[in-house]
């Protein structure tokens, strides 16, 4: 499915809605309420998920409801409010946006977000550990500031640190499995997209080694700064092409091919873990590629269901058997 239209016509809004149903949050803003129109007190996104060869009457209905006042967010599955870990995984997507080109040169938080976005859709254990870790880290940082202001004692950190280490170990185990799989895929995928012979590799920089000891060793500095300086929230990874860090030395074309390789490897990981193909969401990605790379990407995507947005019909001309829709001021009409 291809959505064609000029900028600011609503193409990305539709894509964002689908991604919201899969991820439980927007990929465009950090605060869910910002997705509501300024004059809208509430909103909902609803969809039906039908897997391959499934009877349409057995579709899984999923919904996200947002209310501005009082601020409320509910997720529903089969018309019942459920916790996030029961909701996530109902629809699995791999998202391509122009912002993904910042994965290499942007801040480490973008690369952590990339790992987390993939894993929370697949792994309830990871989601639990990740949610618990974030909550514990927030509480630890509050305690650090209290110790700094002499409102609490340093020994109180022992309780939080033991729990943080437990959750961190789960996060690192799952992230390690994910990145190890990507590492095994990247070289071949990069060659397919770029048509070259260069070797693409992934390097993971984590704080896993002797984490409990390092957490204790950094206490004085953490108290002084009022925040925790080591842990999964500081992890990072880099992509290396023929011994060169792409973030520092890669050309624009090399970086584009590397990011696409990373996304395609993610698709294969989801297939490997679930036995099902994810829905691909591509927001104006083809305009970032030259004709050769567009053609190679189209060939690789033929086996998948996808929603593609673009301002130019020529960009999706290589996608076979694709229904094309025009979006004008939020209205969607099929192009015959």
Image: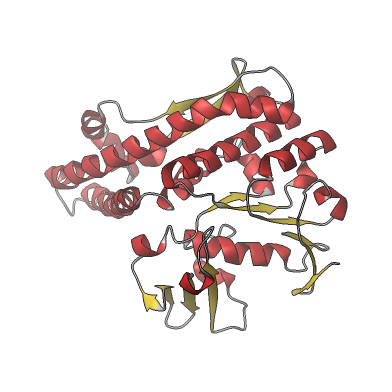
Residue at 35% in and 60% down = 85
Q: Is residue 123 visible?
A: yes
Q: Nearer the viewer, residue 6 or 295?
A: 295
Q: How is the image coloured?
A: secondary structure
Q: Is residue 230 visible?
A: no
Q: Is residue 78 left or right of residue 125?
A: right
> Which image quarter: residue 34?
bottom right
Residue at 62% in and 83% down = 39
Q: Is residue 324 left or right of residue 56?
A: right
User: Residue 179 location, x and y as percent?
Assistant: 45, 32
Pick the quarter of the image with the N terminus: bottom right
User: Residue 156 location, x and y as percent?
Assistant: 14, 47
Residue at 28% in and 51% down = 145
Query: Residue 128, relative to residue 235: is it above or below?
Result: below
User: Residue 7 location, x and y as percent?
Assistant: 80, 62
Pick the quarter of the image with the C terminus: bottom right
How many labels sit on residues?
A: 0
Query: Residue 122, relative to residue 329: is it above or below?
Result: above
User: Residue 36 location, x and y as percent?
Assistant: 58, 75
> Which image quarter: residue 234?
top left
Residue at 77% in and 35% down = 293
Q: Nearer the viewer, residue 171 or 38?
A: 171
């Amino acid at each position: 499915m291809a959505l064609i239209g000029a900028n600011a016509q609503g193409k990305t809004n539709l894509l964002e809605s689908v991604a919201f149903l899969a991820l439980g949050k927007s990929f465009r803003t950090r605060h869910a309420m910002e997705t509501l129109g300024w004059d809208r007190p509430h909103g909902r996104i609803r969809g039906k998920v039908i897997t391959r060869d499934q009877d349409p009457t057995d579709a899984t209905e999923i919904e996200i409801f947002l209310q501005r006042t009082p601020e409320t967010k509910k997720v529903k599955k089969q018309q019942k409010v459920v916790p996030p870990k029961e909701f996530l995984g109902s629809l699995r997507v791999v998202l391509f946006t122009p912002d993904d080109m910042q994965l290499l040169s942007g801040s480490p938080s973008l690369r952590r977000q990339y790992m987390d976005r993939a894993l929370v859709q697949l792994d309830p254990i990871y989601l639990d550990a990740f949610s618990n870790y974030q909550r514990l880290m927030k509480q630890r940082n509050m305690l650090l500031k209290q110790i700094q202001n002499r409102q609490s004692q340093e020994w109180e950190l022992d309780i939080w640190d033991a729990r943080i280490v437990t959750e961190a170990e789960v996060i690192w185990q799952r992230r390690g499995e994910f990145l190890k799989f990507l590492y095994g895929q990247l070289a071949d995928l990069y060659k397919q997209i770029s048509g070259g012979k260069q070797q693409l590799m992934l390097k993971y920089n984590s704080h896993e080694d002797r984490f409990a000891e390092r957490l204790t060793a950094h206490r004085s500095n953490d108290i002084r700064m009022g925040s925790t300086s080591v842990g999964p929230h500081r992890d990072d990874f880099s992509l290396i092409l023929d011994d060169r860090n792409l973030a520092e030395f890669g050309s624009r074309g090399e970086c584009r091919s590397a990011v696409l390789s990373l996304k395609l490897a993610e698709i294969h990981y989801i297939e490997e873990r679930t036995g099902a193909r994810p829905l691909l969401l591509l927001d104006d990605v083809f305009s970032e590629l030259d004709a050769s790379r567009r053609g190679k990407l189209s060939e690789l995507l033929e086996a998948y269901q996808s929603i593609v947005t673009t301002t130019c019909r020529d960009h999706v001309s290589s996608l076979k058997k694709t229904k094309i829709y025009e979006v004008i001021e939020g209205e969607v009409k099929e192009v015959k």
